[in-house]
Amino acid sequence: MTGKRTWVPLGSTANKQGRVVGVNLCGGNAVFPGVMGTTVFKVFDFAVAKTGLNMTEAEKAGFHPIQAIVRGYDRAHYYPGGKESVLKVIADKESGRILGGQAIGEGPSDKFIDTLAMALHGKMTCHELANVDLAYAPPFSPAMSPVIVAANVLTNKLEGTLVAIEAREVKEKLETSKKAFQVLDIREEKEVKEKKIPGSIWIPYAELKKRIGELDKNKETAVHCESGLRSYKACLKLRSEGIENVKNVDGGMLCWCYNVESGG
């Protein structure tokens, strides 16, 4: 990704380098092209995987990274026994090129990351990744792969359809700019009872249109759900009703709970 030296001590890398050595010892001219840092490991029942650069690494490498965070499942939502992994995909704001990704959960983290690793090798943009033809059948994947969903989110950001705000920034603005800032929670009552952002306004998505008058149209509005999909739809609805300064909270409560409360 960066062309710089790195240390990624994996058996898969060692075997590929061993083949290069063997080919060259036998008179060949093989070259090892480097690594993307693709790896996976298990923490209890969670599969944790990554490839390429994270947000911090991308910034240090001179990119202008943007991210998409989505919930991904290993089968169609109506198919029994589904497992979930949270997926983050990172792209360069200037070129749209995919830069990396991370996944964690009981779901197919390895499958998501292997797909992204191929996108990295092909130097694909988020526009190109969104149109990749991936295998689908209800026992194996949702109709729209979470990788493609994430690529569409990134595309929306690049095209200006989606304006995002990170959980850390939401927390900071609630503490320093409350007179000009409001947080809208559009989740269902059961979800709100389990966890809520302090100071947020709760209006379920289904009631948003008839209760839109409860919002201050002059304030910057950060909208969130559990992961970001419903709140994206809510942002579009608010804009259609004349509330322009609307932002979608990246990753919703998933990122609030991790980034803000855990300090991760």
Image (spheres, rainbow, N blue to C red):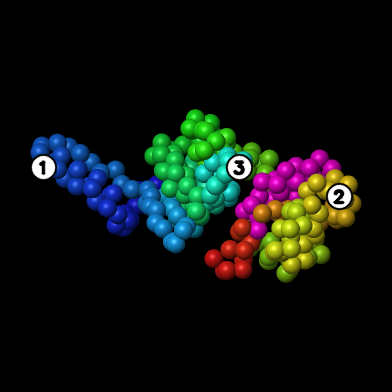
How many angstroms separate mark 2 from mark 3 (CA)?
A: 30 Å
Q: Which three-letter amino acid code belongs to the residue tagged 3?
A: His
| Residue at (81% x, 54% y) in the render | 203
Q: Secondary structure at mark 1?
A: helix
Name the residue beneath numbered marker 3: 77
Are the residues tagged 1 and 3 within 8 Å (C-beta)? no
* Residue nearest the observer in this picture, 143 or 244: 143
Name the residue beneath numbered marker 2: 212
Q: Which residues are magenta?
A: 227-253
Q: Which three-letter amino acid code belongs to the residue tagged 2?
A: Ile
Which comes before the other along the chain, label 2 or label 3? 3
Name the residue beneath numbered marker 1: 25
Direction front: furthest residue: 80
Q: Nearer the viewer, mark 2 or mark 1?
A: 2
How many angstroms separate mark 1 from mark 3 (CA)?
A: 52 Å
Which comes before the other along the chain, label 1 or label 3? 1
> Count of labels shown?
3
Residue 197 place in picture, x, y as percent: 72, 64
